[in-house]
Image (tube, rainbow, N blue to C red):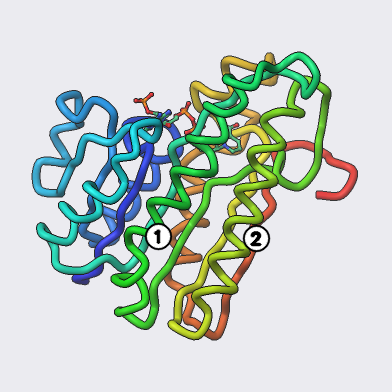
Amino acid sequence: MDKVAVISGASRGIGAAVANRLADAGWRLSLGMRTPQDANARWAEHHVSEFDAAAQGEARWIREALEHYGRIDAVICCAGVMEPQDVIEIDDDVLDAMMEVNVKSPRRLVRAAWDALGGSGQGRVIMLASLSGKRVASAASGSYSMSKFAAVALTHGIRQKGWDQGIRATAICPSYVNTDMAAAITEFPAQQMTQPVDIARMVELALDLPNTASVAEIAVTCRREAHY
Ligand SMILES: NC(=O)c1ccc[n+]([C@@H]2O[C@H](COP(=O)([O-])OP(=O)(O)OC[C@H]3O[C@@H](n4cnc5c(N)ncnc54)[C@H](OP(=O)(O)O)[C@@H]3O)[C@@H](O)[C@H]2O)c1
């Protein structure tokens, strides 16, 4: 396997689980982290880049990854933030900051990698969106849902734009996943949540499926929902 995946938010949570699974499968990784000096020793043989989604560093990171590996086959956007504020109370600057990390930075990251993704003829983009990008479950999740609906739309826009170049894009849309993010917002028992390793299995499947078996969205839940 000589394929290369770029993963944002790889320091912990879902991004770390995805990185571990893909490394086990033989992928070569370029990992974006805000504090690369804290990176796990396992990543010594991979490429780790300092990356803050709020700091417009996408083009530099992708340039570094291409210098290091010479190719990019997949971009996996796992960096994300959740502000549990409703759509009336949230201030513009807080909403803007969440949109920056959850939507605008992933767009810049994919744009920076676009030619490399198209060049392979089988480029893949995986967006860790959310089930909050499919439905608004509560008032407090309203602002986050705004960002995640936009992340799902971004994924579909990428899929439409890249189809003829063999780029396939998948939005993964879970409800609660057992990470720091969910622990901060719910009392729902951690062991009953979807586990990050299972999200990583879905990411690997979406990466491996051929161009003729594109999956645009994967909706995932650990509890009964009206429609999922
Ligand atoms: N957990 C859930 O229940 C759940 C459900 C649905 C969707 N999601 C989505 O899945 C993705 C991963 O979430 P998670 O559960 O793994 O969250 P997490 O455990 O809170 O981890 C968040 C990750 O995003 C990174 N990050 C945050 N702000 C960043 C920034 N400005 N620049 C670069 N990296 C930044 C964090 O890096 P640091 O270590 O530097 O903070 C960390 O690696 C997010 O998009 C989230 O919205 C999560």
Q: Quadrant of the N terminus?
A: bottom left
The mark that comes first in sequence, 2 or 1, is 1
Give the vertical position of 60 relative to 40 (above or below).
below
Q: Residue, x 45% and y 38% (percent of image)?
A: 14
Question: Do we see residue 190 in this rendering?
Answer: no
Mark 2: few/some/many CA within 10 Å (<14, 14-19, 20+): some
Q: Nearer the viewer, residue 152 or 219?
A: 152
Q: Residue, x 49% and y 21% (percent of image)?
A: 180
Residue type beneath disc 1 = Arg
Which marked residue is nearer to the observer: mark 2 or mark 1?
1
Location of residue 216 in the rendering, given as x and y in whole percent from the top left corner: 63, 66
Q: Residue, x 21% and y 58% (percent of image)?
A: 28
SS of the residue under disc 2: strand
Mark 1: few/some/many CA within 10 Å (<14, 14-19, 20+): some
Residue identifier under label 2:
217
Q: Nearer the viewer, residue 58 or 28?
A: 58
Residue identifier under label 1:
111
Q: What's the CA distance linking mark 2 and mark 1?
A: 20 Å
SS of the residue under disc 1: helix
Location of residue 19 in the rendering, given as x and y in whole percent from the top left corner: 32, 46
Location of residue 203 in the rendering, given as x and y in whole percent from the top left corner: 47, 57
Relative horizontal placement of residue 140, taking residue 41 as reference (left or right): right
